[in-house]
Image (spheres, rainbow, N blue to C red):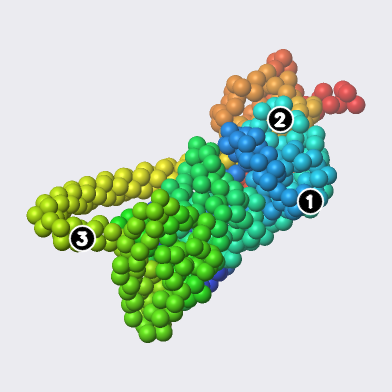
Amino acid sequence: MPDDTDDGVDPDLEQLLAFIRDARGFDFTGYKRSSLARRVRKRMHDVGIAEYLDYRDLLETSADEFGFLFNTILINVTSFFRDTESWSYLQQEIIPELLGSAEADQEIRIWSAGCSSGEEAYSLAIMFAQALGIEECARRVKIYGTDVDEEALREARTGAYSEKALEALPEDLREDLRELYFEQSGSRLVFRSDLRRRVIFGRHDITRDAPISRLHLLVCRNTLMYFNVEAQSQIIDRFHFALRPEGYLFLGKAEMLLSDGERFDIVSMRQRVFRRRAGRAEPPHQPNPLKLTAPTGGERRDAARKRQLRDLVLETAPNAMIALDLDGAITQVNSQARAQFGLTSQDVGRPLRDLEVSYRPTELRSLIEQAHSERRTVRVNGVERRSSDQDVQYLDIIVQPLAADDGMVVGSSVAFVDTTTLTRLQLEVKRNREDLETAYEELQSTNEELETTNEELQSSIEELETTNEELQSTNEELETTNEELQSGNEELETMNEEIRIRSTELDEARTFLEGVLASVAAGVVVLDGELRVRSWNRGAEELWGLRSDEVQRQPFFQLDFGLPTDALVEVVQRCLTSGRRTDPVDLIAVNRRGRRIRCSVICSPLDSQAEGVVLLMEDLQEAGEQD
């Protein structure tokens, strides 16, 4: 079977993923191919299938196999207050600031995305209850817990967990949580009902479904690392739309937002806490539902690099540039425009007419309307602009309509080309041509040096970005492997507990059987199918003088004791053949004291699947004396 990674796509695996999406609505095409292929192959190995196409045939014929496959792919590793250092930071630094900025009696909305079996959502309820008080938390806080795994959600909705679920917490914290937030129900701990009603669980696919909106806090820990770069970008778009301005995003220790500085501020990179910047949120991008095949790893990286390059070209352009949509709202502002006209990232989304740049240094709205109506570039040269210190700046303003592939105008761009230096040079030329030529050569040399420096810096930035992406991918892969190992360890612990219980039951059954045999006064001997001694009770020891450990596993008819065993060969064989109990056989024997006795022997078949017989030996003389 080929080894498909993010760089090499296995078409058979892609067909299998498309089939799963179309048949059951689970879209795994955005998952990292290396970890996804490893989980699918694990399930294929369990059912003894080597090829993806053969496994697809199994899915088509067995509806239950989908459930086993999903449980293998969706690694549900979670716990209460997992990574306690990060949760402590959230409790001590973030929640007080979040509650302090919220209006009185305002509902606090929280989303736990990828909540698995619910421990994370209930941890949030506990944390806010400690900050607000239980009654206030039950009145104001609403927590949404979502996941794609219905089986895990069913467990989360019960709110019942084993004692082991709290074992990883410090002892003092564990006892406080048991007393305040859980009720004992048999061997399970049930989360308290008043807070449980404020936690809402539901199925939600963060790669496809519309996000929950107006959130104060969004928690999504160790979930993004399973997705490829393109899927992560789409998910972050949805998270940005879901959060209200100044809302907090709490990620896992293997996840970062290094390329979203325009939309998120870093609150704590160590604890992976980010804050959404104020500004209008754009609706999240919705993928085309008709697209049946996922892009290859190379295409995803090319798209990411092109998008990054496009943003860097606009951001580092030497001229101030502003992009507008058809409604006249600002969609992009580069660094030169922010520095030159005092704009900020918070102005993105505002109408142009509300800003000073719309009428100073010239009326832009009429130029934009002209460019749209005539569908051509409109240019105004030599516009004079005076700064606060009365310095004169000359600008060429270029308004360019932006058209889509179908020819429809979707917006416009406004570029401000600073021509102050050129204008002054032209004036200087009139006074002294030689001085102007010297100044021009110096300017040209400086410009070339700056361009060379800029290219070197750009190359270094791209190399650092590439190295960072590789390190991030490796970190996520290691975290994924760690969770898989933890999941396997939990399965082994469960199996070990079952084996221990079975062993205890077997020990009890053996002790009981030995007690029953020991209580029988007559001699009882159990022989297996090969006529070897399997059991020799105390009555047999008293009768013949041989201990149980001396005869164990020994051939019965080769033992030398007072019973003439040759006379029993035919009786035992007849019992084995017929499967019925034989009549008593009376034999003259010698007991352990050397006395001649008359011994009655009855042979019965074993009443079980194992082949063998039970011999009941009784001293008739001693029995008669007792009578």
Residue hosting label 1: 105
Count residues near mark 1 (Cα–Cα under 10 Å), then give few for <14, some for 14-19, many for 20+. Answer: few
Left or right relative to 434: residue 164: right
Q: Secondary structure at mark 1?
A: loop
Which of the two residues, 317 or 130, is positioned nearer the viewer here?
Answer: 317
The C terminus - image quarter: top right
Camera-near label (1 vs 2) is 1
Residue hosting label 2: 173
Image disc number at residue 10: none
Q: CA distance from mark 1 to mark 2?
A: 29 Å
Tell me which residue sits at (70%, 27%) in the image.
171
| Residue 168 image offset from top left, x and y in percent | 63, 33
| Residue 142 image offset from top left, x and y in percent | 73, 53
* Earlier-in-chain disc, 3 versus 1: 1
The N terminus - image quarter: bottom left
Mark 3: amino acid: Leu
